[in-house]
Amino acid sequence: MSDFHGYARIGLGNLTTRGKIAELSSVVDHDDRVIHNYTVDDIDRSLVRLLMQDARRTYNQLSREVRLSANTVAERVRRLRASGVIARFRAELNPAALGRDLIMVADIRLREDVDRRQFEQGLRSVRQLVAGARMTGEYDYQLRFACVAPADYETVVDQLKRDHGVREVRSRLLLHDLVVDVGNLLDLAGDTSPGMSRHTRQLK
């Protein structure tokens, strides 16, 4: 069995907690994967937090941190990935290191005759695009672009309007990202508020 388990970053997927143990029971995530009965205990939480700090940690290193055998740790990580709690391991590019330290946030409104699926597929040709989401409200999408200069972003806006059916763009300059500890979800008690997730409602 290999001692190395992933790449450079970890993402959290389907997760809910109630007190010290969270149970995931036969729900379907956004990728249509069925997640069967799986419990997240304190050791799993420790493993996920350690991997979020450094996803390149080996099973031997993790085993020393949680005081379990490397084989046991490997099996726990495998189950966390299979259940969807750990969504992925991945490398993350630093746009600034590539000379693209001008990050623009654009609210996008499409023309009414534009098919959103075609729009989303067409965005693959916009090389400066680094993140995006479909939104509710006044605008249809919020996109992020990594540019080298204002003229580079101006080219992006022109391309969106000319080739991708964009009617309106509202642009803002990103000053910096907030450092957010997504691992806090591991400690979140069962929430009965209206804003809780679809998965949390199903798991109660």
Image: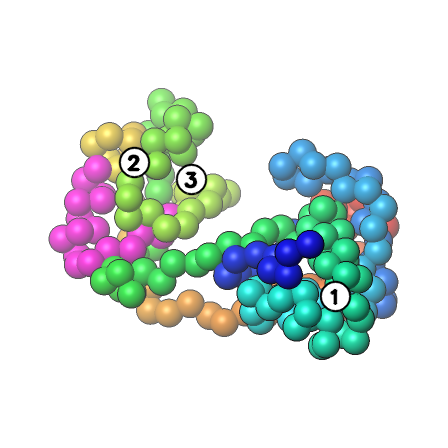
Q: Amino acid at mark 2?
A: Ser
Q: Amino acid at mark 3?
A: Asp
In this view of the protein, which residue sits in the foreground, 95 or 64?
A: 64
Upstream in sequence: badge 1 or badge 3: 1
Upstream in sequence: badge 2 or badge 1: 1
Q: x, y percentage for residue 112? A: 37, 26
Q: How many marks?
A: 3
The residue singled out by tag 1 in the image is 70
Determine crowd level at label 1: few under 14, some 14-19, many 20+ residues with C-alpha closer than 10 A.
Answer: some
Identify the residue shown where x is 74% and y is 66%.
70
Please provide the residue range marked out in magenta: 143-159
Which is more foreground, mark 2 or mark 3?
Answer: 2
Which mark, residue 140?
Answer: 3
The residue singled out by tag 2 in the image is 125
Q: x, y percentage for residue 144? A: 36, 52
Identify the residue shown where x is 71% and y is 77%.
65
Q: Amino acid at mark 1?
A: Ala
